[in-house]
Image: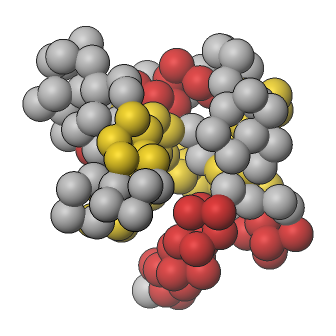
Amino acid sequence: MTGESGDGWVHGPDGARYWGRYGAAGLLVVEPSGAVLLQHRAAWSHFGGTWGIPGGARHLGESAFEAALREATEEAGLPQGLVVARFESVLDLGYWSYTTVVADAAQRFEPRLADPESIALRWTAADDVDALPLHPRFAEAWPALRARLERGAAG
């Protein structure tokens, strides 16, 4: 671990709670054909039963990229050295932030359920993501993330 664990809730001024005392990060992995790796969250988890990306609390002193890689390794069995970061998208609330790290995988890999936070992992075509019951924050972020992915593919 890079530093002190960031596991724990942050409570916003409106009473909303967010996981990660030092913020949080997730990894949106894109394989060569353009499919993205999604995680079906366990029913007991925050917004359980929804689809999102592997991610979680950042540790003290840990970069968003380091946290996203660590979480994707812990939750989906991401092989080391397989991804290269393409861009980051940050939701900054002033008292808490979430960074989505978008990364390209050199090849498609078989994700594996590596912890109890997931009930399924699967590669999903970008066109099919909206049809799933998405984690509310991922649902809000997905249109802009998808647009950036499409611009990158065209350029």
Seen at 56% across and 63% down, the residue is 137
Q: Is residue 131 left or right of residue 11?
A: right
Nearer to me, 35 or 114:
114
- Residue 99 image offset from top left, x and y in percent: 35, 55
Q: Quadrant of the N terminus?
A: top left
Q: How many marks?
A: 0
**Quarter of the rendering containing residue 86:** bottom left
Q: Is residue 131 left or right of residue 144?
A: right
Q: Quadrant of the C terminus?
A: bottom left
Residue 105 higher or lower than 117, as above or below: below
The colour scheme is secondary structure
**Quarter of the rendering containing residue 24:** top left
Q: Report whether residue 130 is seen.
A: yes
Q: Is residue 24 left or right of residue 112?
A: left
- Residue 125 image offset from top left, x and y in percent: 79, 63
Residue 108 higher or lower than 91, as above or below: above
Q: Report whether residue 67 is seen.
A: no
Seen at 50% across and 23% down, the residue is 73
Residue 83 higher or lower than 98, as above or below: above
**Quarter of the rendering containing residue 108:** top right
Residue 84 higher or lower than 113, as above or below: below
Seen at 45% across and 47% down, the residue is 17
- Residue 22 image offset from top left, x and y in percent: 23, 38
Seen at 74% across and 50% down, the residue is 51
- Residue 60 image offset from top left, x and y in percent: 16, 27
